[in-house]
């Protein structure tokens, strides 16, 4: 009898073990083509649906014996327009199938459904190791879906959102599971954002992988095994996109266009912002505004953290701290300040609170599996949480902003704690249920998109009630495609030199991951920086798309004037430089919207043919022509940095440098290493205390000599409203052509928008000859000497903004 029991136990244990084993596809037994989609079926029921999206994008969806789920994605809009393919060929070979586009060759092996992607020259870009495999999870009923690929020779990996680690990800492992990580450090994982997209570079050719799966997902970049890279998720489908470059920039462009870039922001959103946890009461908040204007430090936006509310109830004002918010906001606006308020997802459980009672009456809050409402503690105490994956809840939430935006005059909203964060457990329990836009799901599937969907609902409300002005929103947590709805910041960082280094890396990484409108809390949120650290940080942040100081009030003051007169002057200098550069930054944002190009670009993106760029992290470009490298150590008076191949000018001295080598950039506290690409045309505005303070009557064009040809662009649509969507915008394309004895500047103008400025002040840098005369559209133009900070005598001329050609000899 004992032997029988032992044998039965062995059989049960053996079945359990076999139930946990990894499963793989069998042999392909059929293939069906429908237009640009191919369905491969294996003898064990596994299927691969391979869709040719474009000649550079392939989508791979795998199903086990349960078949395909409804095709739904929060990242990729279902109505995304797709161009017809010029060339698509499908052939069957004895041991594989082959799909060929204008740019790619994809082979699918019959034996085990593994795949390989090559470019048209035959270079292997991506090859499966095991390929798709899975393991059933009895605890959840989900399949743990896995993909493993061979590591190509000399490969490098980039991207994956806000990971606080080295730029090159090879040898690392990461997890996507949005987490409130207060005071994170280098290597902390996971963080707030969930962007399952990475780029791969080998043999100087780039491609990307976008794993569109919202479950907790992991990525191993040759960490466990040096010859294998893999990604997997705790449920859902193995559903990924292969995106071909061949340049790194093109890969990011393809991904950004696939998941859609944002609309143009109001120009003021690219100005300087000031925030603190918290500014209150009203007199203190007003005093911050007064502090900026009295010191002539430009600023466009002031923020109110959670203490502006009545007991932390969203969409309310504290009657004690802010008794007359409408008047306060209006008077601050008259002085050029836009008021931004924080809104969290937790709705206080309070029968006398209308937002709560509306949500309760309409059943808008998340529920547990057995029916009770999800309850968790955040700042207001016990709260319920809206299910932002329901369209009707998003519509309700958007409507709640009428009071703050339309009636009180608030200009922007900042979403925090939306990972979602809960004090007791970190986040919601796994059994919380979500509508998921008609595809019911548990928290395991919805967690990583909760913040994105909250930001989506918030953006809809701010847009509705801000109209005809443009909306501005910020989010801490997001998913792939979340760039459509908001800007972002890198979360609760620390006032340390290590975090200044991290801010540089994280903002670059988010930018190449499709999310360019990003910045860090200048000076650090946790603890207090000294004056040197704050000065170095604000110098870096002046070149980040989102530019905001934010701090925790229990760590001291962190306004630009909080560190003595020297640092105040330095902060004024760098913030003023940002305002001068606004036409350049705004144009760079337009390129991001129009073309999907990342606003911040690591060195490898500037020249992937130069292997010396692959492991560099500090240097980055903002847009096409500015190269920045922050000082991230105390007591430094400069740093060594790498210049990409070509000719460059040091911003502060006009010294010409040749790239393809390390150079020393001298930079005391009043400078940041900043270079301009030869041939660039850099447009500058006059310094303003806020966007719109004065009418811009003249734009300065700084033209940098190049022996050769270089192109630049200046975009203008007024910086507000939606006229640009009907074509009311102007694009000015400049071409610099330099020889040993001449410099020619040509301008082509597209569009019907008439800007406020009528003239250019054109300043010429780096001329290798002494200019004797200039012509504008064949007519003589007087040359004068421009005043510069370095006392250098540079030729300049004043011309009408509609000129076609300037020639200097």
Image: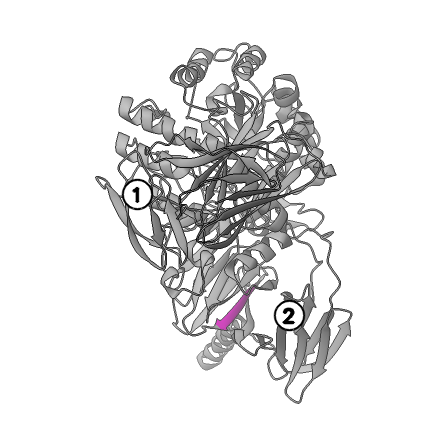
Most distant residue in the right direction: 34
Q: CA distance from mark 2 to mark 1?
A: 52 Å
Q: Which residue is mark 2?
A: 64
The kind of secondary structure the magenta stretch mainly shows is strand
Boundaries of the magenta span? 144-149
Dot 2: element: loop
Q: Nearer the viewer, mark 2 or mark 1?
A: 1
Numbered label tally:
2
**Color style of the picture:** one colour
Q: Which mark is residue 673?
A: none
Q: In this rendering, does residue 183 appear at all? A: yes
Q: Which mark is residue 631?
A: 1
Dot 1: element: loop
Residue under the image location 56 percent in, 23 percent down: 692
Mark 2 surroundings: few (<14), some (14-19) or many (≥20) residues within 10 A: many
Q: Residue 803: which quarter of the image?
A: top right
Q: In this rendering, does residue 367 appear at all? A: no
Percent across and percent down for residue 67 are: 69, 67
Percent across and percent down for residue 660 are: 36, 60
Q: Is residue 337 left or right of residue 727?
A: left
In-front residue for pair 444/200: 200
Percent across and percent down for residue 200 are: 48, 64
């Amino acid at each position: 009898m004992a032997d029988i029991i032992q044998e039965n136990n062995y059989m049960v244990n053996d079945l359990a073990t076999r139930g946990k084993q990894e499963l793989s596809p069998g042999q392909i037994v059929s293939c069906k083509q429908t237009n640009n989609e191919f369905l491969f079926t294996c003898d064990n029921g596994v299927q691969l649906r391979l869709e040719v999206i474009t000649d550079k994008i392939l989508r791979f969806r795998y199903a086990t014996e349960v078949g395909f789920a409804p095709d739904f994605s929060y990242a990729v809009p279902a109505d995304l327009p797709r161009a017809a393919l010029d060339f698509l060929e499908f052939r069957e070979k004895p041991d594989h199938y082959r799909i060929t586009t204008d740019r790619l060759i994809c082979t699918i092996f019959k034996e085990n459904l593994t795949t390989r992607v090559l470019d048209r020259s035959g270079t292997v870009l991506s090859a499966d190791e095991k390929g798709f495999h899975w393991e059933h999870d009895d605890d959840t009923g989900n399949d743990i879906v896995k993909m493993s690929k061979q590591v190509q020779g000399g490969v490098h990996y980039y991207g994956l959102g806000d990971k606080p680690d080295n730029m090159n990800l090879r040898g690392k492992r990461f997890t996507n599971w949005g987490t409130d990580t207060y005071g994170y450090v280098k290597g902390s994982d996971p963080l707030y954002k969930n962007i399952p997209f990475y780029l791969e570079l080998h043999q100087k050719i780039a491609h990307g992988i976008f794993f569109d799966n919202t479950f907790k997902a992991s990525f191993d970049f040759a960490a466990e095994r040096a010859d294998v890279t893999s990604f997997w998720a705790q449920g859902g489908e193995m559903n990924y996109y292969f995106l071909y470059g061949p340049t790194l920039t093109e890969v990011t462009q393809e991904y950004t266009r696939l998941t859609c870039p944002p609309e143009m922001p109001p120009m003021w959103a690219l100005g300087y912002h000031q925030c603190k946890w918290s500014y209150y009461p009203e007199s203190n908040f007003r005093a911050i505004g007064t502090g900026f204007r009295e010191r002539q430090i430009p600023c466009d936006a002031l923020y109110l953290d959670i203490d502006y509310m009545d007991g932390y109830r969203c969409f309310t004002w504290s009657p004690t701290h802010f008794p007359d918010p409408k008047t306060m906001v209006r008077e601050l606006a008259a002085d050029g300040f836009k008021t931004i308020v924080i809104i969290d997802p937790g709705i206080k459980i309070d029968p006398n609170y209308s937002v709560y009672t509306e949500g309760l009456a309409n059943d808008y809050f998340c529920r547990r599996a057995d029916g009770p409402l999800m309850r968790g503690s955040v700042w207001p105490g016990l709260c319920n949480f809206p299910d932002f994956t329901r369209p009707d809840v998003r519509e309700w939430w958007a409507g709640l902003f009428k009071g703050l935006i339309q009636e009180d005059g608030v200009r922007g909203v900042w979403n925090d704690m939306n990972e979602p964060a809960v004090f007791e457990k970190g986040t919601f329990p796994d059994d919380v249920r979500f509508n998921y836009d008609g595809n019911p799901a548990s928290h395991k599937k919805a967690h990583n998109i909760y913040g994105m969907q909250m930001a989506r609902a918030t953006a809809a409300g701010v847009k509705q009630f801000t109209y005809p002005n443009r909306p501005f929103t910020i989010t801490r947590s997001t998913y792939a495609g979340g760039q459509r709805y908001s800007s972002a910041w890198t979360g609760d960082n620390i006032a340390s030199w290590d975090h200044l280094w991290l801010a540089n890396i994280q903002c670059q990484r988010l930018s190449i991951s499709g999310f360019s409108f990003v910045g860090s809390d200048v000076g650090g949120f946790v603890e207090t920086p000294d004056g040197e650290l704050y000065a170095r940080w604000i110098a870096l942040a002046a070149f980040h798309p989102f530019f905001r100081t934010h701090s925790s009030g229990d760590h001291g003051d962190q306004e630009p004037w909080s560190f003595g007169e020297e640092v105040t002057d330095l902060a004024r200098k760098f913030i003023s430089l940002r305002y001068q550069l606004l036409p350049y930054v705004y144009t760079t944002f337009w390129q991001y919207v129009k073309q999907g190009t990342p606003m911040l670009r690591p060195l490898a993106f500037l020249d992937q043919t130069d292997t010396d760029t692959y492991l560099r992290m500090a240097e980055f470009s903002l847009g096409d022509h500015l190269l920045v490298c922050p000082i991230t150590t105390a007591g430094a008076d400069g740093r060594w940095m790498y210049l990409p191949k070509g000719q460059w000018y040091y911003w502060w001295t006009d010294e010409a440098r040749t790239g393809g080598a390390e150079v020393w950039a001298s930079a005391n506290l009043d400078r940041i290493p900043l270079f301009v690409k030869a041939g660039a045309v850099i447009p500058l505005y006059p310094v303003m205390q806020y966007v719109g303070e004065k009418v811009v009557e003249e734009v300065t064009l700084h033209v940098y000599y190049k022996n050769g040809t270089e192109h630049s662009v200046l975009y203008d649509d007024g910086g507000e409203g939606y006229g640009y969507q009907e074509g009311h915008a102007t694009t000015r394309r400049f071409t610099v052509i330099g020889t040993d004895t001449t410099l020619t500047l040509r301008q082509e103008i597209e569009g019907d928008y008439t800007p406020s400025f009528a003239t250019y002040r054109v300043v010429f840098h780096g001329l290798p000859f002494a200019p004797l005369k200039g012509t504008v559209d064949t007519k003589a133009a007087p040359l004068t000497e421009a005043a510069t900070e370095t006392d250098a005598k540079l030729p300049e001329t004043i011309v009408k903004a509609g000129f076609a050609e300037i020639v200097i000899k």
